[in-house]
Image: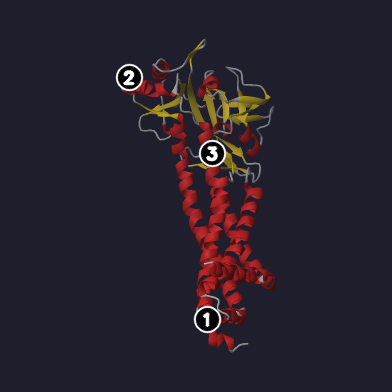
Amino acid sequence: MRNWLSQVLAVTGLNLRTIKDRKGASAATAFGVAGVVMVLVAVFSISVGFRKTMANSGSADTAIVLRSGSTSEMMSGLLHDATRVIADAPGIRRTASGPAASSELYVIVDVPKRSTGTVANVPLRGVQPAAFEVRRGIKIIEGRSFLPGRNEIIVGEAAAQQFAGLSVGSTEHWGENVWTVVGIFTANGGIAESELWCDAGVLQPAYRRGDSFQAVYAKLESPAAFPKFKDSLTTDPRLNVDVKREDDYYAEQSRALSALVTSLGVPISLLMAVGAVFGALNTMYSAVAARTREIATLRAMGFRRSPVVLSVLAESLVLALAGGIVGALVAYLLFDGFRTSTLNWSSFSQVAFAFAVTRGLLVAGIVSALAMGLIGGLFPAIRAARLPVATALREL
C-alpha cells in the first residue's frame, strides 16, 4: 500500500509540474470551465435573488384575503362591505387605532426604465393607514409619507433606482390625477420596494373604482391565529374569499420565474459544459500523447496502471478546480447585488430585485467544475493506463 501511494504521489507530482509546459492548452481548459461556472452561477443567482425578494415580502403572522379563485391581486375584487367584515374577524391584531387590517387597491401605471427608456408596468398601490402597521418594515428614507386625501405617493427604493421620474418632488399624470412624489421608502428588501404607494381613498376615484378594493392585508395576533382567522372568513356566508398566509402567497408568485430561469438556464449551462468537457478531453489527450515515453518508462520501471490513471485525473481536476474558482469569483464580483427588474408573471408588473450569489451557488459551481474535470480526464487517463509498454518504448 505504501509503495502504491508513493507511486501515485510521484507520478501526480510529475504531471502537475509539467503543466507549465502545456500552458496554452491548460489555460484554455481552465477558462472554458470558468466560463461555464460563471454562467451557471449568474443565471441561477437571478432565481435566488427573486425568491429572496419574495421571501422578504412575506410574514407568517400576516394574511392576505382575495376573492375566491383569484391567483393574484390583479384578478381579485372585494366590495367595501366585505372588507369591513374581514377587518372584524377574530385573530386580527388590535391596536389603539383599530384592527391592523389594510384594504388595498392595486393598479398598473406606465413608467420608463432608467437603463433603456422602455415603458414598464409598475404597481401603484392604494393603502389604508393600517398598512404601515401590517408591514412593519416600511421606513421612509427620503422625504415624508403621503398625507391622506392628497394626490401624493411614496416610492419604493428599488423602483426609484430602476425607473425614471420617481425622485422626490417629481409629478406624474396617472388615471385622472396628477400625483406628486413626496417620499422614498424601504421595506426590508421586499417586493414593496418595487411599488408606489398612495392613499386608497384617493386612488379609487382616480381610476373610477367606486368603493371597491382588491385585497385585504391583515396582521394577526400570532402565526397560530391563522386557522381561526381563515375559518371564520371561509365559513361566513356573506363572503366568498380565499385566505392565505402572506409568505405562502409570495412563494407561489415566485414559482413562475424560477421555473422559467431553470428551464432556460439548465440547457444553456449543459451545452456550455459539454464544450468545456470536450476542451478538457482534448487537453488531457494531448498531455497523454506528449508523455507517452515518460508513461512507458514508468511502466517499465514497475509503476502500476492505477497511479497513472489517478495522476491524469488529478491534473484534469486541478485545471477544472482552478477554472471553477475563477468562474465563481468572477460571477460573485460581477453579479452579487446587481439590481435589475423583471416581469412578475402572476401580476404582470415589474419587480425590482438584486441578483444573489449565495454560498450554495458558489459551491454548486465548483462541484460542477470538478465533475467536468473528472469526465474530461477519465478517458485520457484510461488510455494512458492501457498504453502498450513495448510499443511506447519504441518511441524512445
Q: Position of residue 59 (x, y in %)?
A: 49, 28
What residue is shown with label 2? Answer: 238
Q: Nearer the viewer, mark 1 or mark 3?
A: 1
Q: Position of residue 126 (x, y in %)?
A: 53, 25
Query: Looking at the figure, which quarter contains the C terminus?
Result: bottom right
What residue is shown with label 3? Answer: 52
Q: Which mark is residue 186?
A: none
C-alpha gap between disc 1 and disc 3: 53 Å
Question: What kind of residue is marked 2?
Answer: Arg
Looking at this view, name the residue that lies furthest to the bottom. Answer: 394
Q: Which image quarter: residue 21?
A: bottom right
Q: Is residue 255 left or right of residue 363?
A: left
Identify the residue at horizontal 41%, vertical 30% (top origin).
76
Question: What kind of residue is marked 1?
Answer: Leu
What residue is shown with label 1? Answer: 387
50 versus 261 height, above or below: above
Q: Is residue 13 left or right of residue 250?
A: right
Q: Is residue 100 left or right of residue 297?
A: left
Question: Helix or strand or loop: what does disc 3 sit on?
Answer: helix
Q: Earlier in the sequence, mark 1 or mark 3?
A: 3
C-alpha gap between disc 2 and disc 3: 37 Å
Question: Helix or strand or loop: what does disc 1 sit on?
Answer: loop
- Evaluate if marks 1 and 3 touch, with contact meaning CB atoms under 8 Å apart: no
Residue 131 shows in the view? yes
Identify the residue at horizontal 62%, vertical 25% (top origin).
139
Q: Residues within 10 Å of mark 3 (few under 14, many from 20)?
A: many
